[in-house]
Amino acid sequence: MRGQDLVPSWWGLVLACGGAEGITLEEVRPAADNPSPSPGATLQLLWRGELLALLEEAGEARGLRSAGKARLVARLLEVLPGDVLRARVREAVCARGDWRADVNA
């Protein structure tokens, strides 16, 4: 079995080769869209506060403000369609900006 057979067909593959002139990168297979993304897995990219904000915007946060992340994800999967969830997750992640702390400080 070849290595590229181990990963999904929509994953792009790049081969790194070392040589006398340094490392070169060669595209083996271009990336494509995931044909069946999981809305639940996509929601895991969000922080708890972002999940709660989505529920509040949908008018579905009542009784969930102190709930854990798993319960918030489950409720979002019940009330919003997958395409809307994917779009909202993308917006939320892009809106974070430079949120990482400087680990060397």
Image (cartoon, rainbow, N blue to C red):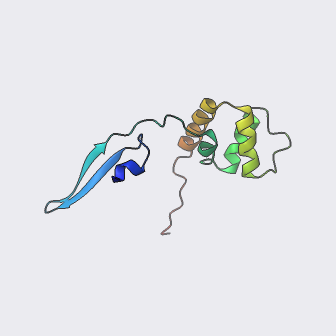
User: As displayed, is residue 29 above or below residue 82?
Assistant: below
Q: Where residue 3 sits in the image (x, y, percent)?
A: 35, 53
Residue 96, can we see it? Answer: yes
Q: Where residue 49 sits in the image (x, y, percent)?
A: 70, 48
Q: Where residue 80 sits in the image (x, y, percent)?
A: 70, 32
Seen at 28% across and 52% down, the residue is 15
Residue 52, can we see it? Answer: no
Image position of 93 (left or right of 6):
right
Task: Looking at the picture, tell me which residue is in the foreground, 92 or 30.
Answer: 30
Which residue in the rendered view is the most extreme toward the right? 63
Seen at 60% across and 30% down, the residue is 83
Which residue in the rendered view is the most extreme toward the front? 1
Task: Looking at the picture, tell me which residue is in the foreground, 32 or 87.
Answer: 32
Seen at 84% across and 39% down, the residue is 62
Which quarter of the picture shows residue 36? top right
Seen at 76% across and 47% down, the residue is 71
User: As displayed, is residue 44 above or below residue 17?
Assistant: above
Q: How many marks?
A: 0
Which quarter of the picture shows residue 58? top right
Which residue in the rendered view is the most extreme toward the bottom? 104
Which residue in the rendered view is the most extreme toward the left? 20
Image position of 13 (left or right of 18):
right
